[in-house]
């Protein structure tokens, strides 16, 4: 037996040497990679569908408007001014869009930190949605900056501005986008067929999740902190020292409501990509997410009541802007919260999806009120977005949907590939088999 054991390393060593890539092996692998990418770039499914035609026209016209914007400036395509420097591209694409992307950090916290495995089937698609949202909304932010090349200043160290809330938001925005890419990267490794790389990326997932959660709590509340500097310009019913907390709490139920809606749509559009076990758990997942939404929404409503009392702004409820505020809080927050509560108790999926849709509208209305509608509400002339601003926003959303569809049709988003043995494990396994002989 001793003699047999002494020969073991000699048997395994040639396998280790064989794993060292040569130039010929690298060139062969590169050629395979290029062929694979070219094959994957080919369309899958029908091209001339109503959705493709409509969104394609929107994207093409949007690109023309973007070219005009960069060639002639913001004034050529927007209604922005010195009085109203932030418009639809900030108020909706960034301030509202970041709230809708909040489902990624909430869900990864539930799955990877709390260990709630029943939500694991939708973890990848939620992270992918969050990553694409941040990537495309960063592009929308680029459009809104008068000198877009200055967007890198906080990152490269030119005009750091460490005391500014914008500096905090910029860095958190950038780092969180990177963290979400790392969280999703194992799916890219599986798609490319690189098993060892996939395992390395999987080992980074937990650290990326923890890092991403820390960043999300910072910049979700940081967006609300931006408007603390607008005291006197923002209507008293929307201004509060609790704005950072309200923005953070609302991102929880806004993100999860968007997850419910996206899951409902994906179940129809990507039905062939979703395993049967995942479809069977869809109802249970929706009910569970709805319960989280109920808790977060009632915390938000409590903050709204506390704001009215502490800020002494109850009297404004009798004004026209007060009626608009009540429509937002009661019509699009309290009622959806009640529907979530009733639907979760009876497991009524239709009611829960209606509640999710109402919540999404409510959060969008709130963010637009804070950033646009209630900002300088008493000014003689108010900002109204131009048709080109609205068109570009639709183009950004359409392009994001195209990117999502392309990825889901090709990568293992709804299911993870089976674990594979790497070279070291193959060596040990073959060594054991040789030993058994």
Image (cartoon, rainbow, N blue to C red):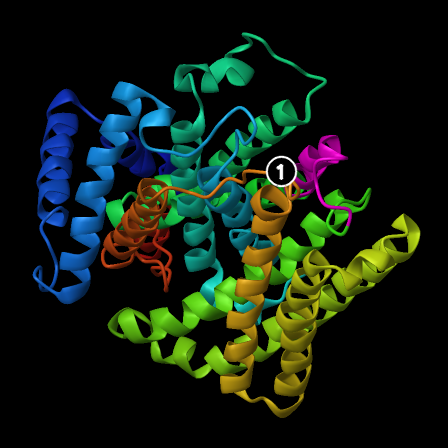
**Measured from the top left, where is residue 378 in percent x and y?**
66, 42
Q: Nearer the viewer, residue 303 or 211?
A: 303
At 68% from the left and 16% from the top, the residue drawn is: 162
**Measured from the top left, where is residue 235 in percent x and y?**
72, 45
**Measured from the top left, where is residue 15 in percent x and y?**
27, 36
**Measured from the top left, where is residue 242 in percent x and y?**
80, 46
Q: Nearer the viewer, residue 409 or 268?
A: 268
Quadrant for residue 18, please give it: top left
| Residue density around tag 1, few if under 14, some if 14–19, many if 20 or more, within 10 Å | few
Quadrant for residue 339, please give it: bottom right
Magenta-drawn segment: 218-236
At 11% from the left and 63% from the top, the residue drawn is: 45
Q: Quadrant of the C terminus?
A: bottom left
Dominant SS of magenta comes to helix
Residue 128 can be seen, yes or no: yes
The answer to whether residue 399 is above or below residue 63 is below
The answer to whether residue 352 is above or below residue 133 is below
The answer to whether residue 429 is above or below residue 295 is above
Residue pointed to by mark 1: 379
**Seen in the image, is 133 located left or right of residue 228?**
left
Q: Is residue 232 magenta?
A: yes
Q: Nearer the viewer, residue 400 or 278?
A: 400
Residue 1 can be seen, yes or no: no
């Amino acid at each position: 037996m001793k003699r047999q054991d002494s020969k073991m390393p000699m048997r395994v060593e040639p396998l280790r040497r064989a794993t060292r890539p040569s130039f010929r092996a690298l060139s062969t692998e590169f050629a395979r990679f290029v062929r694979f990418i070219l094959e994957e770039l080919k369309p899958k499914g029908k091209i001339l569908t109503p959705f493709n035609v409509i969104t394609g026209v929107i994207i093409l016209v949007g690109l023309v408007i973007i070219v005009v914007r960069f060639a002639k400036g913001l004034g050529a395509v927007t209604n922005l001014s010195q009085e109203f420097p932030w418009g639809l591209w900030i108020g909706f694409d960034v301030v509202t869009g970041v709230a809708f992307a909040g489902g990624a950090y909430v869900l990864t916290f539930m799955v990877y930190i709390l260990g709630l495995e029943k939500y694991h089937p939708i973890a990848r698609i939620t992270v992918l949605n969050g990553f694409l949202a941040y990537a495309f909304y960063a592009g929308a932010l680029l459009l809104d900056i008068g000198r877009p090349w200055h967007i890198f200043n906080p990152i490269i160290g030119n005009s750091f501005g460490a005391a500014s809330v914008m500096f905090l938001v910029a860095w958190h925005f950038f780092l969180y986008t990177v963290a979400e890419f790392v969280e999703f990267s194992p799916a890219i490794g599986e798609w490319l067929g690189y098993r060892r790389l996939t395992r390395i990326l999987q080992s980074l997932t937990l650290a990326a999740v923890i890092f991403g959660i820390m960043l999300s709590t910072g910049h979700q509340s940081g967006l609300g902190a931006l408007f603390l500097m607008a005291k006197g310009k923002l209507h008293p019913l929307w201004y509060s020292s609790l704005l950072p907390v309200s923005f953070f709490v609302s991102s929880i139920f806004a993100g999860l409501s968007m997850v419910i809606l996206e899951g409902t749509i994906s179940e129809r559009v990507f039905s062939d990509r979703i395993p049967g076990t995942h479809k069977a758990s869809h109802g249970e997942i929706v009910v569970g997410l709805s319960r989280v939404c109920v808790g977060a929404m009632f915390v938000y409503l409590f903050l709204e009541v506390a704001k009215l009392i502490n800020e002494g702004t109850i009297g404004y409820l009798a004004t026209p802007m007060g009626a608009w505020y009540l429509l937002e809080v009661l019509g699009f927050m309290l009622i959806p919260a009640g529907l979530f509560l009733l639907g979760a108790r009876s497991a009524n999926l239709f009611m829960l999806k209606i509640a999710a849709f109402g919540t999404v509208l409510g959060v969008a209305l709130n963010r637009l009120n804070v950033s646009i509608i209630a900002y300088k509400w008493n000014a003689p002339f108010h900002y109204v977005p131009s048709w080109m601003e609205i068109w570009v926003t639709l183009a950004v959303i359409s392009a994001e949907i195209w990117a999502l569809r392309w990825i889901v049709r090709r990568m293992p988003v709804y299911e993870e590939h089976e674990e594979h043995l790497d070279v070291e494990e193959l060596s040990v396994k073959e060594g054991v088999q040789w030993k058994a002989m």
